[in-house]
């Protein structure tokens, strides 16, 4: 089967065409600046990558260009749209309604819409992508794969906040967690690397990218995760604050005269390592800055790694032990310095890093010493492949 995987953002659309039989990537690309002007970057495997400026007034136009790019006689990956058997959509928020991926129906669309206020920037864009595919590829099944679904197994003690219970029953305010597709994919692979049945494992997955989250996966199920009602919670991130004392918001409002919306923007877009370092959100730039003696870059890296370390300790406690720790996503896969810092002085917990093995960037590898009781791995994530697998399983 050929599965088109679509990840719609508010002004962007990422896509991959995957042959699910061989799990081979046939083509991939990105539409950017949707509703601004429009740019498509496309690569068919084995052919040259190209970028084109194209008018994209909306996501329908973007999906049309994607389908044209995929079927282009010279640069495309397929000859006809009928070769696409199914479309898998990444959907950010499924609330408590979706604990699994689903085939999209009118009822499912209505239920996703009901979750819109939990992810106002993302869910509406995801729905636009679904509708565009329904319109342009009638008859082709669409599947929704939710970032939140994997975490629906958390026990109530892990997802309830210490605020009046009515806010949970009335407004569904609780911890949901995100990056679920990645945490699921990586924990399964980690269990394979351990050579164990996943039901018998306790794994901590550190998905460290521009957005970062850490999940405790016990017996293959998410039992706790760092992100919350929204992806702002947990460890500090590229530009997001992560956990802060909630009283800071009122304090900051009084000091600066800024309103809730402005403070929310600061916490989402101007905080994290960006805010600490004075403008660097990319960890490569932070590393370079630190090497050049920029102490705030050093501080940002220290705060980030310390946050990761604390959650590892917390989740080992939550699960009553840990068999393996997996590092994934841009930073987790490519940043030996951060991995080493987060894993330092943890021999008391049975974690010993092999400094030579930890030099790995981008490849799957065990980075703990052979005698380390807890195994530590770098496991590259592949959310698109995970979405394609879910899609095939459902259609
Ligand atoms: P993500 O959001 O998963 O794409 O991760 C973005 C972060 O990963 C950035 O801070 C990058 O510095 C880091 N990153 C991504 N790719 C690389 C790479 N090849 N080498 C070093 N760091 C990388």
Image: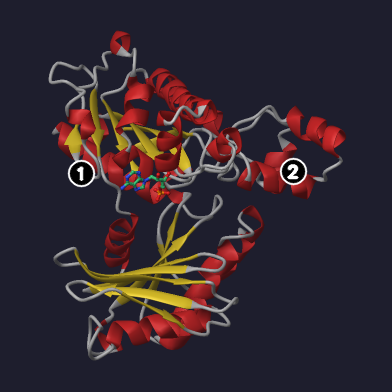
Residue 74 drawn at (x, y percent):
22, 88
Vertical position of residue 7 compared to residue 138: above or below: above
Does dot 1 land on a helix, a strand or a loop? loop
- Foreground residue, 264 or 360? 360
- Which residue is under mark 1? 363
- Give the spatial CA distance, label 1 vs label 2: 39 Å
Q: State the residue at coordinates (33%, 36%).
A: 335
Does dot 2 land on a helix, a strand or a loop? helix
Q: State the residue at coordinates (23%, 84%).
A: 78
Residue 375 drawn at (x, y percent):
22, 25
* Count of numbered marks: 2
Q: State the residue at coordinates (41%, 17%).
A: 317
In the rendered structure, which disc, 1 or 2, sits on the residue that comes first in sequence? 2
Report crowding for label 1: few under 14, some 14 to 19, many 20 or more residues within 10 A (C-alpha): few
Residue 96, labelled with which disc?
none
The reply to whether residue 214 is visible in this rendering is no
- Foreground residue, 321 or 301? 301
Residue 136 drawn at (x, y percent):
43, 87
Ligand 1 closer than 8 Å to label 1 CB: no
In the displayed structure image, the side of residue 287 where residue 334 appears, left or right: left
- Foreground residue, 282 or 121? 282
The reply to whether residue 340 is visible in this rendering is yes
- Which residue is under mark 2? 263
User: Within the image, what quadrant is residue 385 found in?
Assistant: bottom left
Q: State the residue at coordinates (36%, 84%).
A: 67
């Amino acid at each position: 089967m050929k599965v088109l995987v679509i990840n719609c953002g508010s002004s962007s659309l990422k896509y991959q065409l995957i042959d699910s039989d061989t799990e081979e990537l046939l083509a991939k690309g990105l539409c950017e600046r949707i509703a601004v002007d429009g740019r498509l970057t496309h690569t068919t495997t084995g052919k040259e990558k190209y970028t084109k400026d194209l008018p994209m007034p909306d996501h329908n136009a973007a999906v049309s260009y994607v389908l044209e790019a995929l079927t282009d006689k010279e640069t495309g990956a397929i000859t006809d749209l009928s070769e696409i058997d199914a479309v898998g959509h990444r959907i950010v928020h499924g609330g408590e309604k979706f604990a699994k991926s689903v085939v999209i129906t009118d009822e499912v669309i209505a239920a996703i819409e009901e979750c819109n206020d939990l992810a106002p920037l993302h869910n509406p864009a995801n729905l636009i992508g679904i509708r565009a595919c329904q319109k342009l590829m009638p008859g082709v099944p669409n599947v929704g794969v939710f970032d939140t679904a994997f975490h629906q197994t958390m026990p109530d003690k892990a997802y309830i906040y210490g605020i009046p219970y009515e806010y949970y029953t009335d407004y569904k305010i609780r911890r949901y967690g995100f990056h679920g597709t990645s945490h699921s994919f990586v924990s399964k692979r980690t269990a394979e690397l351990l050579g164990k049945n996943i039901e018998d494992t306790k794994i901590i997955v550190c998905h460290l990218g521009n957005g970062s989250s850490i999940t405790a996966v016990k017996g293959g199920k998410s039992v706790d995760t760092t992100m919350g009602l929204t992806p702002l919670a947990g460890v500090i991130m590229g530009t997001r604050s992560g956990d802060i004392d909630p009283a800071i918001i009122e304090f900051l409002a009084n000091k600066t005269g800024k309103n809730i919306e402005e403070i929310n923007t600061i916490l989402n877009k101007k905080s994290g390592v960006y805010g600490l370092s004075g403008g660097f959100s990319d960890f490569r730039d932070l590393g370079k800055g630190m090497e050049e003696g920029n102490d705030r870059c050093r501080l940002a890296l220290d705060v980030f790694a310390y946050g990761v370390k604390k959650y590892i300790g917390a989740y080992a406690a939550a699960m009553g032990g840990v068999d393996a720790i997996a590092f994934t996503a841009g930073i987790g896969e490519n940043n030996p310095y951060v991995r080493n810092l987060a894993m330092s002085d943890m021999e008391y917990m049975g974690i010993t890093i092999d400094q030579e093995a930890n030099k790995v960037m981008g490849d799957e590898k065990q980075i703990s010493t052979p005698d380390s009781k807890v195994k530590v791995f770098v496991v590259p994530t592949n959310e698109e492949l995970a979405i394609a697998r879910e899609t095939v399983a459902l259609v």
